[in-house]
Image: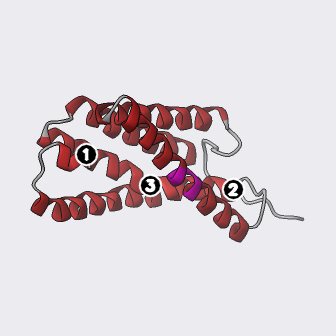
Amino acid sequence: MLLLAAGLATAALGPALLLIGALGLLGAWYAAARLDVRLRQTTVVTLGVVAAGILALGLTFPGTVGTLAAAAVWSIGFGAVAAVFQTAAIRTRGASPDVVGALVNSTANIGIGGGAALGALVLDGVGLPAVPYVGVALVVAALVVVLVARRAFPAGPAVEQTAE
């Protein structure tokens, strides 16, 4: 909806979404290279890139080029989100990796549904241009949680504890 509202031609929507989605692989690559070294820093950078992309979207909308560029940045950051939160959840050792995976997946689905509901309320209320600002506020809230939850997002590499 944002891309079309920014003036992207309907025929260009599919290729644009394919390219933007493919850019998420850069974020996944970054996460894969950094998670075992610096989980906390990787998570902060990931959420910072997502927030920057969403904020840029709000600032550049309805310009077509700016909206596309902002969506690309957002997608790069978002490509790492699942990996960083899955890794953090497993490292807390609150449950088995299988249970943690199910919980992370469930909370992601709750977030998708809740985000859609909140987005609908924002669209119906103040309108489309406000959606990115609400989104960036939610990502900043997640960033605050990461900064406060030091046990779940350790600064250094994971250290395996073995029984002797």
Looking at the picture, does residue 159 appear above or below residue 49? Answer: below
Marked residue nearer the N-terminal end (3 or 2): 3
- Identified at 12% across, 42% down, the residue is 65
Q: Main secondary structure of the magenta part?
A: helix
Q: Which residues are magenta?
A: 109-113
As helix, strand or loop, the secondary structure at mark 2 comes to helix
- Identified at 53% across, 35% down, the residue is 143
Viewer-proximal residue, 60 or 147? Answer: 60
Give the residue type that dot 1 points to.
Leu
Q: Nearer the viewer, mark 3 or mark 2?
A: 3
Looking at the picture, does residue 112 appear above or below residue 57? Answer: below
Cα–Cα span, label 2 and label 1: 37 Å
Give residue 123's position: percent from left, percent from top.
37, 38
Badge 3 vs badge 2, beta-carbon distance below 8 Å? no
In which quadrant of the rendered view does residue 45 lie?
Answer: top left
Give the residue type that dot 2 points to.
Arg
- Identified at 33% across, 52% down, the residue is 75
Labelled disc at residue 2: 1
Residue 45 visible? The answer is no
Circle 2 crowding by C-alpha within 10 Å: few under 14, some 14–19, many from 20: many
Labelled disc at residue 80: 3
Circle 3 crowding by C-alpha within 10 Å: few under 14, some 14–19, many from 20: many
Apparent side of residue 135 relative to residue 40 in the rendered image (left or right): left
From the image, tell me which residue sits under label 2: 91
Give the residue type that dot 3 points to.
Ala
Cα–Cα span, label 1 and label 3: 22 Å
Badge 2 vs badge 1, beta-carbon distance below 8 Å? no
Circle 1 crowding by C-alpha within 10 Å: few under 14, some 14–19, many from 20: some
As helix, strand or loop, the secondary structure at mark 3 comes to helix
Viewer-proximal residue, 149 or 141? Answer: 141
Give residue 37's position: percent from left, percent from top.
54, 52
